[in-house]
Image (tube, rainbow, N blue to C red):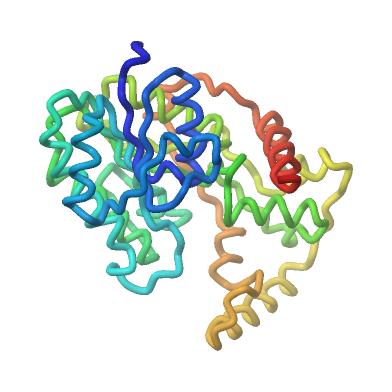
Amino acid sequence: MSAKYRILITGGSGFIGTNLTESLVLDGYEVLNLDILEPKNPEFIENWKKTDINSFDVLKVDVVDFNPDYIIHLAARTDLDGTNLEDYKTNILGVENLLKISSELKVLKKIIITSSMLVCHGGYYPKDQFDFMPTTVYGESKVMTEKLVWENKPSCDWAIIRPTSIWGPWFGIPYKSFFDMILSKKYFHIGNKGCTKTYGYVGNSIYQIKKILFTDTNLESKKVFFIGDEPATNIEEWANEIANEIGDKIVKMPYLLIKTAAIGGDFLKFFGVLKFPMNSFRLHNMTTDNVINLANTYEVAPVLPFKRKEGIINTLKWISDYKKK
């Protein structure tokens, strides 16, 4: 593929965007990252332009001037702290703006819009692309993201991606905290309640996104792609593998003790104390299986480049290097 192709990334300063920008630049593409925040990795400051995707006029100028061949839309508010849809307007208005502008781009070959696995709550297995069951306002905002795409289908090829639980270099909450707790010997298994989930090492996620971007996905019955690794992983097994790399061993704590702490966390949150490490929502998330069907993704991207152990080693090295800066 020609290195002259121009690839626009919105939200390229975030976790996945940072890794994606690096990968595409190294592949030789001309990459522009539109984000309100500076890149996490300062090496790619020249690929960044400060842009608020909620401002239609500003966004239009920046997108039209760049005239991309491909667009990967990652920009979003992704935390769970919002209380209403207005708090997540970037996930709605920003998408609406980008879809309007992209319809005017004559050379655009494909656009990928990023949603989230939280359009369905953990443990719920959707019957098809249009089966939604969110339990958070963030999840509701991403349902609206997807509906906007279906109601305003791009004239070029397009796809929706739903990242699962992605981890690796440049990550933040929650999985950076997960690694940090293991490294500081503060992590423990929750009785026999360890869950099995679909996680994804970010190096594999970038491979999957690039394969989806450069592969025709014209079938409307296969427009949604979950991003993650197979097989699903038991969190105890994963934590033990991380601990093993640093020569440590993780202990188990009784479930009822952790449940009591979670209730205490709910009480503190009610009174505005937000930094307590455990609450009922988090405990439920940590003990509920969530195995995602990745069949569509593996048809397009069948051979992951990284094993989980490689991902762990790479991530531990990044954490160590990042602390030295």
Above or below: residue 285 compared with residue 98: below
Front residue of 215 and 74: 74
Above or below: residue 208 compared with residue 195: above
* Residue 281 image-quadrant placement: bottom right
Whether residue 76 is visible here, answered yes or no, is yes
Whether residue 144 is visible here, answered yes or no, is no
* Residue 66 image-quadrant placement: top left
Q: Position of residue 80 (x, y in %)?
A: 45, 65
Q: Position of residue 59 (x, y in %)?
A: 23, 47
Task: Please identify the quadrant where the N terminus is shown.
Answer: top left
Direction bottom: furthest residue:
271
Q: Position of residue 26 (x, y in %)?
A: 50, 21
Front residue of 296 and 147: 147
Direction top: furthest residue:
1
* Residue 259 image-quadrant placement: bottom right
Residue at x-position 44% and y-position 28%: 208
Count of numbered marks:
0
Left or right of residue 85, residue 205 in this image: right
Q: Position of residue 96 (x, y in %)?
A: 19, 50
Above or below: residue 319 compared with residue 231: below
Task: Please identify the quadrant where the C terminus is shown.
Answer: top right
